Amino acid sequence: MSPSPEREHPFKRVANELRAEILRGDLPPGERIPSENTLKDRFGVTRATVRKGIALLRMEGLVTTHQGKGAFVRERPHVNLRQTGSMYRARRGTGKSNFTAEVEAQGRRPVQAIREVVVTPVPERIAALLRVEPGAPVVARRLLFTVDGAPMQLVDGYYDVAIAAGTRIAEAKLIKGGINAYIEDPEGPIGRRIVQFIEDIEVRMPYPHEARQLDIPDGVPVARLLRTAYDSAGEPLEVLDSILPCDRHAFRYVIDV
């Protein structure tokens, strides 16, 4: 049961009313929050109390603050990730990577940037999914995905060197159509059809390097999405280890039973 307004801590009352205005859209993204002087008069509190209320909203990821400029409702670019087999094939039919085609279909501008491509010992969790020995060498492709210039995902792709060594997967270059198209190309060096994806999702708070690279404010969790691609023989071909800020994505899965 929520406390009555008169029994709330004053800074929480400030935060609660401003939060409600933000969520209703009365204060839209990019809008400047009223000044501390305006809010202290409105709520009958001190400026220190106002600052504490705004700090709470900043921790929740609803506002950002800029020295000398004040507090603003945070812009939150949003992407819907819709997962069905038919949609995957339809997106692939565009000749673009699945992420690029999906984001462009929503009227947004996607960019994939390579952070590094290396041969590295495989992490234990990835080894189990890729069915290789822990510490075995794998090709790791580390990318940053942005949408409309805003960082949206850190994506690390892992590939058994038995499949990827000597191919374009091991090169520090983007591959037209995406890795999956390259894997399935009947005239390419791999030529194996992907028939199944299995995704494992966990939600946690971001690590410092993730928060820095994805510009994640305090209080916003991330989803870690492990996506394994399998061929018709049930062999894993790829593991994608993606970190997604939870305030920028919506997931929809269609499961036919």
Image (tube, helix red, strand yellow):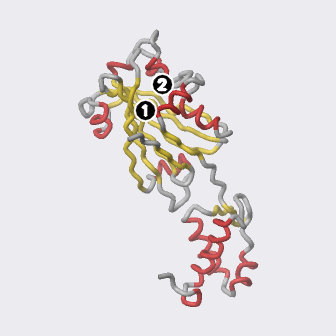
Q: Residue at x 58, y 90 (%)?
A: 6
State which tag comes first along the sequence, 1 or 2.
Answer: 1
Nearer to me, 232 or 96 = 232
Q: Position of residue 107 (x, y in %)?
A: 68, 39
Q: Of helix, strand and loop, which one carries label 2?
A: helix
Vertical arrangement, residue 29 with respect to residue 86, above or below = below
Vertical arrangement, residue 77 with respect to residue 170, above or below = below
221 horizontally vs 134: left or right: right
Q: What residue is pinned by disc 2? A: 179
Q: Residue at x 40, y 37 (%)?
A: 227
Circles 1 and 2 in contact, beta carbons < 8 Å: yes
242 horizontally vs 58: left or right: left
Q: Position of residue 247 (x, y in %)?
A: 55, 54
Q: Is residue 174 visible?
A: no
Mark 1 or 2, closer to the camera: 2
Q: Which mark is residue 157?
A: 1
Q: Residue at x 51, y 27 (%)?
A: 89
Q: Quadrant of residue 109?
A: top right
Nearer to me, 207 or 198 = 198
Distance between mark 1 and mark 2 Cα atoms: 9 Å
Sort mark 1 into few (<14), some (14-19) or many (20+) by Cα contacts within 10 Å.
many
Outermost residue toward the bottom?
A: 6
Please, what is the three-letter code of the amino acid marked with disc 2?
A: Ile
Q: Position of residue 121 (x, y in %)?
A: 31, 31
